[in-house]
Amino acid sequence: MKKKQNRLIIMLLLLSSLLMSLPYLLPHCGLLMLVALVPLLCAEHLASEYGIRRFFWWYYAAFIVFNGLTTWWVGKATVGGGIFAVMANAFYMSAVFALFRMSKKRLRGSLPYIFLAVTWIAWERFYLTLSQISWPWLLLGNAFARTTTLVQWYEITGTLGGSLWVWAVNLGVFGLMLNLSNGRFWEWTAKARYASSIGLALLVIVPVTASLIRYNTYDEKSDKGSLEVLMAQSNFDPWQKLHSVPQSKQNAQAVQLLQAQLCGRKGAEYPQEPLLLMLPESFCADIWMNHPNTSRTYSTFRNELVDAYPNVNLIFGASTFEQFNTRAKPSDYARPLNDGSWYLSYNTAFITDGSGRLDHVNKTKLVVGSEFTPYVKIFGPLDDALGNPMGRTSPQGEARTLNVMGYEEGGEKIASIIPVGVPICYESIYPEFCADYVRKGAQAICVITNDGWWGNTPGYRQHFSYSRLRAIELRRDIARCANTGISAFIDQKGDVLQQSGWWQPDTLRGSVNLTDNETFFARYGDIVGRICTLMFVMLALTLIIKAISKK
């Protein structure tokens, strides 16, 4: 009998892991997440009924399966990082679930389940805002990234509104099933039975219907005009790009790809509107911030692109460095050079044009381990002792826009200034960080990224789909330029207008609409996450008080 009980619980846990994974792996499966947690909740209920001890390891294993199925590809870039991402993220999920199980000893009725939902969302918000060891890839609200017609209301709630929807429906289904199985449902009055059933149905139908109506009635906003964009997908293997392909060859290919589409730009008439060229993240690694003009890559782009074609702006990514000739270490992120000086590393996005202007932003949201040493005062000495296996890229600390400049004929007088947000790779999965660009005036979003580290796996497709959520939350057109795919134009409804193939050189040319309209989410931020965090604090304090008073 005990073996049958254990097998049933294991099957429920595995079913939950599979259902949770499918929306991240396959398109149009977002609705599965609305029931994916039900088997997990059923398994926990049965474990409590049967008095199974050390159940933590059971559901920890289930969360490992979920994380492993969805993000195993991280190991393609770094095996140790992939194992850590799966194990650590599963542990965080299990810790939230463990708190829920503890709360059942002190709270009654539906309160423990409310505590579970708000604790989970508070943890997701912590990942997105405060934690330096941050891996928000598997936010529950991200499950709808490939089912975007159903979550157009993210423009109000943001992605954590989707997480709240997931928990609300799953808990509603579980509660109804539980009351049906123990017969209490039939003890309710007829009104109560109808109200609970209809209420649960409306919890699914109303958000879906509202989203479909919004999707079909939304008109693209272009109150600030439009911007023509030409992007090149240079398509170099990231490992070969670093070690075996000369930068001069990479530069030549990028210039060739862009020039093939710029042949009509040298006309008799001066173009009245600017053209934005885009190249991907970390395109080069030969720029020292102390004297960027000496970079061969920058000189090539100046001579062959922005000076050669009128009214052209160019955004490109670079791994950059800055030297400090000081005895004292200038920053905890600094590393020594052989001559006794120090240097800082950055992941940078530059913009330049024919006027000689060169502006830049540095990446703020950095990938833990490969780019970034978290809590550097604590882990920095350990990293040094181990031979520096972790990256030490220095973060900028905030979002800042870059300006696309349009010039009158002659190139001396500025005719237009178009602020754009330029999230660099990993930054594009952070909703409120991207909203900061809009608050600072961004009229469009230009994502640059390099997803080739993961190979032809679900990783680059997941990353691409999260940009579709940003388009909905901010109602901004997105031009996304990737090294090996997927490069794309995405409209304000999250629809993909054009996209490149995977692992092939390509160019895309299109127009993005410009607007300074702010969505509710862009203006006020993550209200859902804040409310859930407040509720978590209140319920946690209640649990603490109950525990103290019982003693």
Image (cartoon, rainbow, N blue to C red):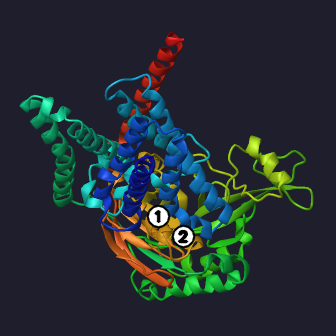
Left or right: 317, with 183 as reference point: right
SS label for mark 2: loop
* Image quadrant where residue 229 sits: bottom left
Q: Nearer the viewer, residue 197 or 84?
A: 197
SS label for mark 1: helix
Q: Which mark is residue 64?
A: none
Left or right: 7, with 379 as reference point: left
Tell me residue 56's x, y (percent): 53, 42
Tell me residue 368's x, y (percent): 64, 54
Amino acid tagged 2 = Asp
Q: What residue appears at the point 26 percent right and 58 percent down from the top-left corner?
A: 221
Amino acid tagged 1 = His
* Image quadrant where residue 250 sits: bottom right
User: Is residue 258 visible from the viewing direction of this image?
Assistant: yes
Q: Nearer the viewer, residue 59 or 409?
A: 59
Tell me residue 155's x, y (percent): 31, 49
Q: Earlier in the sequence, mark 1 or mark 2?
A: 2
Q: Nearer the viewer, residue 80 or 355?
A: 80
Q: What residue appears at the point 65 percent right and 60 percent down from the top-left corner?
A: 81
| Marks 1 and 2 in Cβ contact (< 8 Å) | yes
Q: In the rendered image, which residue does mark 1 sit on?
A: 463
Q: What residue appears at the point 14 percent right and 29 percent down from the top-left corner?
A: 187
Furthest residue toward right = 339
Q: Nearer the viewer, residue 351 or 426?
A: 426
Q: Bin the neighbour count of mark 1 within 10 Å (Cα to Cα): few under 14, some 14-19, many 20 and up.
A: some
Tell me residue 248's x, y (percent): 68, 84
Count of numbered badges drawn on the protein: 2
User: Is residue 443 visible from the viewing direction of this image?
Assistant: no
Q: Which mark is residue 451?
A: 2
Q: Bin the neighbour count of mark 2 within 10 Å (Cα to Cα): few under 14, some 14-19, many 20 and up.
A: many
- What is the C-alpha distance between the residues marked 1 and 2? 8 Å
**What is the quadrant of the C terminus in the image?**
top right
